[in-house]
Image: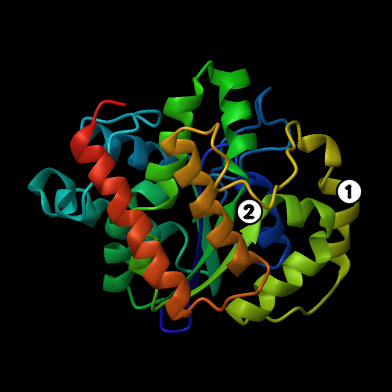
Amino acid sequence: MSNSRSVLILGMHRSGTSATTRGLASLGVYLGDQLIEPRTDNIKGYWEDRYINDLNERLLGALSLSWDDPRYIYSCDFAKPEIESFKPEALSYLNHSLAKNSLWGFKDPRTIRLLPFWKNVLDEMSVRHAYVIVIRNPVNVVNSLLERNGIGSTKANRLWLVHNVPFIHEISKSSFVVVDYDLLLDDPLKQLFRIARALKIPIDSMDELNDYADNFLDLNLRHHSSELRSNIISSGDRNHLETMAQEAYLWLRELALDRLKTDSNLFWSTWYKIQNSLQTINLCCPSI
C-alpha cells in the first residue's frame, strides 16, 4: 500500500463537513460504498462511512461519552486498554475496505475528538495521510444545534471547543488544510483548488468539480449565517466559553484565508494557550 494516500476530514457537527466531504469526492477521494443514507436534517447526504461511524460511537462509549457530551478528553485516555483494543479492528477495516484505493478518506464529526486514536492507526499503516479541517463560525453552529437538538448556548459552545481545540496539534507536522464552510459556499471552486494544491491532489478534469459547484452545493444549505465582527473577541456581553470559541475560530480562519501558514509559530504559540485555557476551565468546571 505504499502508493495509498488517505485524507481525513475533521470538523464539528453542523459545520459543513458533509458538503466539504462531497467536494473531496469530486477531487477523486474514495469514501467507500457503505455510506449513511441522507436524512431530513441533511438531505444532501452525510458522506460518512457507516462502519467508521459505528466504531466512533463505540470508542466514545468506551470513554463513557456520547457525541453531545462536552467533557474534555485527554491524550492519556487513548492509552487505556479498552481504547487500544479497538485498534486491530480499525486497522483491519481500513486495510480491507478503503486503503486498497490510491486516494481514500473518511469523515465523521466524532473523529476530531478521537484524533489521537485515528492518527495512531494511520501511523501504523503504510499510507501517507493528510487532513482537511472544516470550520464554521461557532455562532452559527450554536444556532444550528439549538434548532436541531435543543442544545443551549453554553453547552453548544463547549461542544465546539472540545471538538476543535484539544487535538489539532496532533497533526501540526502533517499535511493539512483548513476550510471555512462559508468560504466554500461563496466560492467552491476556489476552495477545491486550495485543497488540491495543499494536499497535492492532481486535477485531471473539471467536470466533477463543476458538477459539485453548480449542482450539488446550494446556498440554502446555509440555514444560519452571522456576520463576522472585528471586535467579536473583546465583546463584553459574551460569556467566557463563547469568547474562547470565537477566538479559536478566528485563529483557524486565518489559516483558512491563507493569511497564516499551517506551520506558523504565531498560530501554534497562540493555539497552545487556548488549549491550556480550555483544560483549565475543564478542571474548574468539568460539568459545564
Mark 2 residue element: helix
- The picture places residue 66, in percent across and down from the top left corner, at 33, 29
Mark 1 residue element: helix
Residue 235 or residue 53, whichever sits in front: 235
- The picture places residue 29, in percent across and down from the top left corner, at 62, 65
- The picture places residue 179, in percent across and down from the top left corner, at 64, 60
Q: Is residue 206 above or below residue 9?
A: below
Q: Residue at x 61, y 66 (%)?
A: 254
Residue 3 or residue 68, whichever sits in front: 68
Q: Residue at x 40, y 63 (%)?
A: 271
Q: Is residue 115 above or below residue 35?
A: below
Q: Which residue is drawn at 73% across and 62% down?
A: 26
Q: Mark 1 points at which residue?
A: 215
Q: Residue at x 54, y 65 (%)?
A: 104
Taking the view exactly as shown, the residue that stands out farthest to the right is 214
Taking the view exactly as shown, the residue that stands out farthest to the left is 81
Q: Name the residue under label 2.
A: 21
Q: Give the class, few, some or many, for how many residues have Cα within 10 Å of label 2's Cα (few <14, many ≥20).
A: many
Q: Tag 2: residue type?
A: Thr
Give the spatial CA distance, label 2 vs label 1. Answer: 15 Å
Taking the view exactly as shown, the residue that stands out farthest to the front is 236
Q: Tag 1: residue type?
A: Asn
